[in-house]
Image (cartoon, rainbow, N blue to C red):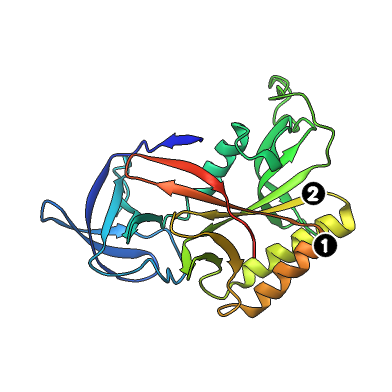
Amino acid sequence: MTTIKQTLPTSKGTLIARRNRFLADVELDDGGKLTVMCANTGSMKTCLEPGRPVIVSESPNENRKYRHTWEMIRMGNTWVNVNTGIPNSVVTRFIDADAIPQLAGYAFVRNEVKYGREGRSRIDVLLTNDAPPKKRKKDPEPVPRCKPNGKPDCYVEVKNTSMRAGSHSVFPDSVTERGQKHLEEMIWLVREQGLRAAMVYFCGRTDTEAFRPCDEIDKRYGELFREAIKAGVEVIPLQVKFTPTKLELVKVLPVL
């Protein structure tokens, strides 16, 4: 089991309310009250209940207006990740540790690389056996992390998945035209470019048994999700256990 330690100092408290898309009010266990950053623009259904225990982190950046960030909330027997800034870096670390067999064996792991039919999109993670171009001539040659596996480049899109419906982790928790576009780009990569594409759904809670698209919220996303699977886009829902001090990759959930 791959484990990543939480590095920022954290505090425990209770959720008072989400003030707006970007801010929430929290009462700390010592009685103090904070307005904290909420790095989650979704509806946060099934993980937005006032009175629930929460964990907030404190940034060392003294220039931030709101120094604290809401990281997770306790729902029943599980902590739920609500910080959408976490998944991309964590999935990259999982890949680099070869903890995701489906994505193992590539010589280079790159982030935020331009791609797409119009070249305007950015992929969260690009797995490739080709060395990235040097930014400056005097830069050292990139060193491959392992022996190339001979597979075509793999484009990996990461989606934070916090919503629960019954025993399922579901995505999205609100209508997402951006998410629909990402699926269309994935389909294009596989069908037209002959490359690999993978949707990684970062399920940051442990009280679910499978993953499915949330058709009841975004019907079009569900249609594109199924079209993507038929086209050959790989779907990898990762169940990740969060605690105040660390997070662990538990397993890959089955897809319904």
Relative to 240, residue 93 above or below:
above
Q: Residue furthest left?
A: 31
Lower sequence index among marks 1 and 2: 2
The location of residue 51, given as percent across then percent down, is 22, 67
Q: Residues within 10 Å of mark 2 (few under 14, many from 20)?
A: many
For badge 2, the amino acid type reads Arg
Q: Which residue is mark 2?
A: 196
Disc on res. 80: none
Report which quarter residue 223 is drawn in: bottom right
Q: Residues within 10 Å of mark 1 (few under 14, many from 20)?
A: some
Q: SS of the residue at dot 1?
A: helix
Give the distance between the C-alpha atoms of the residues marked 1 and 2, in whole angstroms.
Answer: 11 Å
Lateral position of residue 69 relative to residue 83, left or right:
left
Report which quarter residue 75 is drawn in: bottom left
Q: Which residue is mark 1?
A: 231
Task: Kindly identify the residue that appears in the image at 60 percent across and 36 percent down.
Answer: 99
Which of the two residues, 140 or 51, is positioned nearer the viewer here? 51
The reply to whether residue 67 is visible in this rendering is no
Relative to 142, residue 187 above or below:
below
Relative to 250, residue 182 above or below:
below
Lateral position of residue 121 relative to residue 3, left or right:
right
The location of residue 217, given as percent across then percent down, is 55, 78
The location of residue 11, given as percent across then percent down, is 23, 47
Task: Kindly identify the residue that appears in the image at 63 percent across and 73 percent down.
Answer: 177
For badge 1, the amino acid type reads Ala
Which of the two residues, 48 or 120, is positioned nearer the viewer here? 48
The location of residue 216, given as percent across then percent down, is 57, 80
Lateral position of residue 232 relative to residue 204, left or right:
right
